[in-house]
Amino acid sequence: MSLRSLIARLPYPSAGVQRAVGIAAVVAQAGIGVTGSVVRVTGSGLGCPTWPQCVAGSLVPVRHPGIDAVTQWIEFSNRMLTGVVIVVAALAVLTAWRIQIDYPERKRLVKLAWTMPGGVVLQAVIGGMTVLAKLEWWTVAIHFLASTPLVWLAVMLLKAFREGDEPARPLVPKLGRQMLVLLTVLMWAVLIAGTTVTGAGPHGGDVNTHRLDAPIEQLARIHSGLLVAYLLVLGVFGLTLMRVGAPKRVWQRYAWVWIVALLQGVLGTVQYALGVPEAMVSFHVLGSALVIVATALLWTGTRDRGPVTSLEPAEKRELATAN
């Protein structure tokens, strides 16, 4: 019996299940970055000093000279959380595949779903390289930055469950689309600049980790300056929405981007002024994930791919149409 026929035997996912799987994908991809920051600020990055084993000869933490048991378990727990992300990714693929069996045209949905497990594998490899490189700041930066497109793709997957597969029809004028592209580019520029501030900062994941030898004050100015540019472009984008009378849902998403971005800016400023307390670092990483989610929701909300047709089994839909 083929895998496809086995999946066809699964119950058809209801609209609620589809939405729940999409939300779970967003939370999982965003959450693993936040838990990774907890590992870093607690100095537990080398609690498991090798990979894929925790210590040489053992996949799980064992008493080891020179390694604190608490830091071992913090790092090991973060690795185990990857298992949760894998389960969610697998559920996303199974859900999308089951839908496509009834609706063969839903190829884009399946492709987006497959980016979830693909991203987990990529992150596992990069995470292993980061550990083997003894948490060099640039490897940690790559590890974080590699997770950001996965958060974006998870938002697109959530949206795909609730929309059709027609070619995207823009709901904003050409200038607005250009501003949105620039906004997205600036968002990632802010994130990249943020990793350099982190690389020069006090929380490297281990006391012996090399730090970026650059003036943190200057790096922080560049980081905050890019955020200001992001907000300016966001303001210009709002003006284009006023010109065309954008739909209410676009305005709602636009407002959320402002709220999340401003709160993230305030949090970063306070964090820097207080000397970068450990807890605030993790909240700042959470804020970064929320900025990505809000911007991605705005992106998906400014285009229409037609009505969703796959919220119920094909047979039930055909029966309702016939009646």
Image: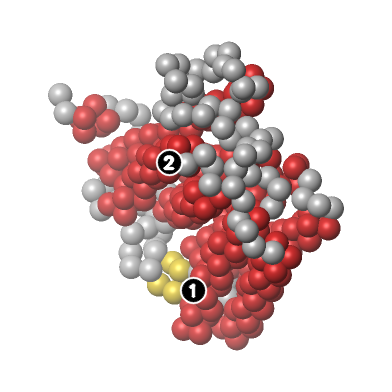
Q: Secondary structure at mark 2?
A: helix
Q: Nearer the viewer, residue 109 or 26?
A: 26
Q: Residues within 10 Å of mark 2 (few under 14, many from 20)?
A: some
Q: Residues within 10 Å of mark 1 (few under 14, many from 20)?
A: few
Q: Give the side of residue 69 with respect to residue 51, left or right.
A: right
Image x and y of residue 150, in percent:
46, 50
- Amino acid type, callout 2: Met
Image x and y of residue 260, in percent:
69, 59
Visible residue check, residue 301: no
The label nearer to you, 1 versus 2, is: 2
Q: Residue at x 84, y 53 (%)?
A: 274
Visible residue check, residue 79: yes
Q: Nearer the viewer, residue 291 or 143?
A: 143
Label for residue 190? none
* Mark 1–mark 2 CB contact (< 8 Å): no
Which residue in the protein does label 2 denote? Answer: 129
> CA separation, marks 1 and 2?
32 Å
Q: Residue at x 27, y 30 (%)?
A: 7
Q: Secondary structure at mark 1?
A: helix
Image x and y of residue 319, in percent:
30, 42
Q: Nearer the viewer, residue 167 or 234?
A: 234
Answer with mark 1 or mark 2, whichever residue precedes in sequence. Answer: 2
Q: Residue at x 52, y 53 (%)?
A: 138
Label for residue 181? 1
**Numbered disc total:** 2
The quarter of the picture where residue 43 lies is: top right
The quarter of the picture where residue 53 lies is: top left
Q: Nearer the viewer, residue 18 or 23?
A: 23
